[in-house]
Amino acid sequence: MWETILATIISEFSDLDDVENATRVTTRLLFAALLGGLLGFEREQQGKAAGIRTHMMVGLGAALFVIASLQDGAMDDAMSRVIQGIVTGVGFLGAGTILKTESLKDVKGLTTAAGIWFTAAIGVAVGLGHEMTAMISTLIALVILHLLPLLTQRKEDPGA
């Protein structure tokens, strides 16, 4: 009986049965969290509510959904549904960061919501094994989030 219990427990942890696959999965999960963390760090530096931990969890979670589906043998149609579910679910998460006052011009949180949504996209890309695409996208997003506001401030205030 104890042998059966031990064998069952061991088989439950056998989804990463070789070093190559374990390294690939670990690398993808860590990289998704790292790239999400870079975006979250920028948002946290700007004093936004969704910071490092939130972005890391979104990137990591999206990557995990994709990786687990791939491990289960998901084909293109199933993977499409997984990605659609991630996009929809994260959309609801992002919607929670948007605040609107009575003035139509005073809407806050749109960039943070877009950042959360984008972080999920990065997690999906990494989960699918497109790390370089995710890294380039992250760098472009950091330019948009960090440098673009500096350019628009100078344009609005020529004396600065």
Image (cartoon, rainbow, N blue to C red):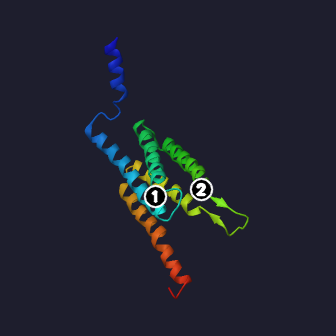
Q: Residue 57 at what x, y percent from top left?
A: 46, 48
Q: Could you tell me which secondary element the residue under label 1 belongs to?
A: helix
Which residue, as the protein is rendered here, is positioned at the far bottom?
A: 159
Residue drawn at x 46%, y 58% is 40
Q: Residue 150 at what x, y percent from top left?
A: 48, 76
Which residue, as the protein is rendered here, is positioned at the far left?
A: 19
Left or right: residue 103 compared with residue 152: right
Relative vertical location of residue 66 with respect to residue 48 in this rendering, above or below: above
Number of numbered discs: 2
Relative vertical location of residue 38 with respect to residue 15 in this rendering, above or below: below
Q: Residue 130 at what x, y percent from top left?
A: 38, 54
Q: Which residue is mark 2?
A: 97
Q: Which residue is mark 1?
A: 40
The picture quadrant where one finds residue 134 is bottom left
Residues at marks 1 and 2 touching, judged by CB atoms closer than 8 Å: no
**Looking at the rendered structure, which numbered label has been put on residue 128?**
none
Left or right: residue 72 compared with residue 2: right
Residue drawn at x 48%, y 69% is 144
Q: Between residues 74 and 96, which one lies in front from this camera angle?
A: 96
Query: Please, what is the three-letter code of the amino acid marked with disc 1?
Result: Gly
Query: Please, what is the three-letter code of the amino acid marked with disc 2?
Result: Thr
Q: Could you tell me which secondary element the residue under label 2 belongs to?
A: loop
For the N terminus, the image quarter is: top left
